[in-house]
Image (cartoon, rainbow, N blue to C red):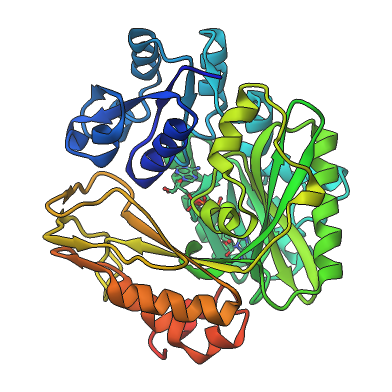
Amino acid sequence: MFEKILIANRGEIAVRINRACQELGISTVAIHSEADRDSMHVRIADESVCIGPSAVNKSYLNTHAIISACEITGAQAVHPGYGFLSENASFAKMLEDHKLNFIGPKFQHIEMMGDKIQAKKIMNDFGVPVVPGSEGKIKDVEHAIRISNEIGFPVLLKASAGGGGRGMQIVKNDEELRKVLPILKQEALSFFGNSDIYVEKFIDSPRHIEIQVMCDTHGNFLHLYERDCSVQRRNQKVIEEALAPDISEDNKNKLYKICTDAMSRMGYLGLGTLEFLYSDGNFYFMEMNTRIQVEHPITEMITRVDLVREQICIAHGEKIFTTQENIKPLGHSIECRINAENPETFQPSAGQVQMYHAPAGNGIRLDTFIYSGYKVPHYYDNLLAKLIVTGRTRNHAIKRALRALNEIVIDGIQTNIDLHKKILSSNDFKQGAVPINWLENKIDKI
Ligand code: ADP
Ligand code: ADP
Ligand code: MG
């Protein structure tokens, strides 16, 4: 096994990775920016290295500083977490060139799936149903207009390199498309370094269903069932649950097989998530994330597989400890993303946590990095904590989540805890599946 791993991330995921390393007897190196000196991930790691100023491009995205930190500390592998460099193929390649191990898939697969246009083409070739749209990037406005009229408005213009819910825009007609396309191209270039745009049919009121896969170097291509991430705001997930309610076993089983077959055709390695829209009983592939996902704990809770531990073992060349037949889902798990944000404007908020008290008890897991007195910097993602609750049934999990949300105390900064309480006590959510546009449409009515 690796002796030392450098964790190239911050926040709750850096803490999560540190825990998996400790349990495997691996020593850890935290990297941090100047703003993160007092951050939890720095305190709990065995060693830490300050790699630059607060701005992410000078610290957490500074590949040269990270590789130097590996060399100085003697770390053999890098865990990138999610966001930051986790889907950066050239970083994975750089590590390989330096004889360092990237805990993730091969850089070729990151590259293939990171370009969403190419990803859809490849999956389509593998027999995975994809969202209808342009086959390839938009050449010019006229091309976009022709395709949009063929598939029918409204359509979604998407940046091929987009992510995190950003880089997409709905357009209703030719005129709007003419206006929006050049702006989106410019934004895509400045945010993602790539101006390629593609067109997709805008699917009305679908659900977001994603399949977790896990593959090793020994020819095992497994799935760990699905997650339903339909409670979203601005294309960003707010609540996720596993398994997805109200979809037939038969329909799900077909999708698991499609996904594992595609992974086997690709020769994929490590963890991955295939994201689909689900509408009228049909699944449509959107994209694949080639990394650990924010909402991975709900899958861990219902399958009892430690995904981060497996990810590390797989990267070291080990065989997955179990078989498909032995991964059986049990119970129902829900994750609430607790963000530092203004409850009225949804703007991210920074400030000092005055008092923090974590909920506990049967079926409760809280993945976080905050503590009483911690100052939340404004430079980074505003995710503060993930409340993960597991119960025997969906109904049980909902009640348990509400109980935990009533116990948790995060004073001094604004959070979306009340929003979570509203969602979980709404009749629509309690009754079963909701579509991706439900939260935004109902936000003032629930
Ligand atoms: P998940 O699919 O795991 O729920 P998200 O889409 O919420 O992940 O993204 C996880 C984190 O990664 C967020 O902090 C998000 O801002 C960031 N992220 C994801 N993709 C990109 C990207 N292409 N560019 C920049 N940041 C990204
Ligand atoms: P990201 O890389 O930012 O995660 P995705 O392609 O996964 O981008 O889309 C993010 C979210 O946007 C989806 O979860 C879904 O809610 C919405 N979305 C994406 N594509 C479509 C579509 N064709 N029709 C309707 N909604 C969509
Ligand atoms: Mg996505």
What is the total number of numbered labels drawn onto the structure image? 0
Q: Is residue 120 above or below residue 329?
A: above
Q: Is residue 382 above or below residue 251?
A: above
- Quadrant, the C terminus: bottom left
Q: Which residue corresponds to the image point at 49% horizontal and 78% vertical from the top-left?
A: 398
Q: Give the quarter of the image for residue 131.
A: bottom right
322 horizontally vs 291: left or right? right
Residue 60 locus on image (x, y percent): 34, 30
Q: Which residue corresponds to the image point at 34% horizontal and 12% vertical from the top-left?
A: 73
42 horizontally vs 87: left or right? left
Q: Give the quarter of the image for residue 34.
A: top left
The answer to whether residue 37 shows anywhere in this view is: yes
Q: Which residue corresponds to the image point at 65% horizontal and 29% vertical from the top-left?
A: 314
Residue 301 locus on image (x, y percent): 56, 58
296 horizontally vs 57: left or right? right
Residue 172 locus on image (x, y percent): 60, 71
Q: Nearer the viewer, residue 142 or 192?
A: 192
Q: Is residue 212 above or below residue 132?
A: above
Q: Nearer the viewer, residue 104 or 73?
A: 73
Residue 41 locus on image (x, y percent): 30, 37
Q: Nearer the viewer, residue 195 or 417?
A: 417
Q: Which residue corresponds to the image point at 80% horizontal and 55% vertical from the top-left?
A: 256
